[in-house]
Amino acid sequence: MKILVIEDDETASAYLKKALTESGHVVDDVADGLQGLNRAMGEPYDALIVDRMLPSLDGLSVIETLRKAGREMPVLIVSALGEVDERVRGLRSGGDDYLVKPYAFAELLARLELLVQRRGRAGAPAETRLQVADLEMDLLTRSVKRADKPIELKTREFQLLEFLMRNAGRVVTRTMILESVWDYHFDPQTNVIDVHISRLRQKIDKGFDEALIKTVRGAGYSIRSGA
């Protein structure tokens, strides 16, 4: 991907550019909102990472101007402002996702890749079937089976499994799960995710030689075949 980072914190910007470059992406970075807007208007970027508080032009104004001009590349907002109202403002300005500082780079990268994939699928035929190893999900009939054995799931269990399977092979954090499956943009301080993951494991993995749902210590969860 070709990514533009608009971030006025030199340390944060340098870290992002290094980490994204090491992940195989092409990265440009600017420290000024107006410069960032001009770059985004004039060059084809696959995605933008935009800080909220910027000199010359704040991040939300950058995004709003881009959207009014018809520029539809995915935008991930990063900010120290983590209140729900601030996140809502960011998303309503045209941002596609909002990540609160400090953040783990693995989560930022996963969110960014997911945004680009979603944008790339826009206008394409909708997926109707997901598969990981011998686990299959039919999105039209809302049915799941493993090794041709039907598995009954409750609504939230189905939604959680669908989110994991759409992100098969990558680590999804608890925050990503809460926002995507429960639509919580805050930590409810409950074990709701652990309970549902446990239930899914009982239904998906119990009785099979290989457990597909993995816990990635300190990071989150992943569904995949193999170690």
Image (cartoon, grey):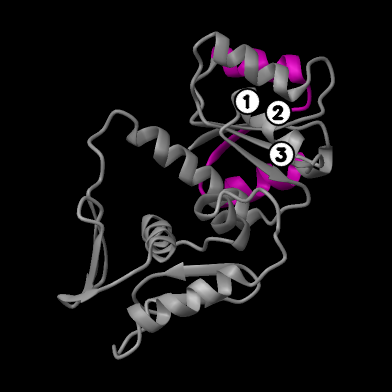
Which residue in the protein does label 3 denote? 78
Q: Is residue 216 left or right of residue 187?
A: left
Q: Is residue 46 left or right of residue 88?
A: left
Magenta segment, which residues?
A: 13-42
Residue type of the residue flagged with mark 3: Val
Which residue in the protein does label 1 denote? 92
Q: Nearer the viewer, residue 201 or 182?
A: 182
Measure the C-alpha gap from mark 3 to mark 2: 13 Å
Please, what secondary structure does the residue beneath circle 1 have?
helix
Give residue 69's mark: none
Q: Nearer the viewer, residue 43 or 115?
A: 115
Magenta segment: does it hold 14?
Answer: yes
Query: Closer to the N terminus: mark 3 or mark 2?
Result: 3
Please, what secondary structure does the residue beneath circle 2 have?
helix
Of all residues, the one furthest to the front in this rendering is: 154
Q: Residue at x 73, y 47 (%)?
A: 15
Residue type of the residue flagged with mark 2: Arg
In the image, residue 68 lies at what x, y percent?
56, 10
Q: Is residue 188 above or below residue 4?
A: below
Q: Is residue 148 above or below residue 19?
A: below
Kindly indicate the quadrant of the structure image that contains residue 75.
Answer: top right
Q: Is residue 22 above or below residue 172?
A: above
Magenta segment: does it hold 83?
Answer: no
In the image, residue 155 lies at what x, y percent?
39, 61
- Asked if the residues shown at circle 1 and circle 2 are in contact, with their CB atoms under 8 angstroms apart, the answer is yes
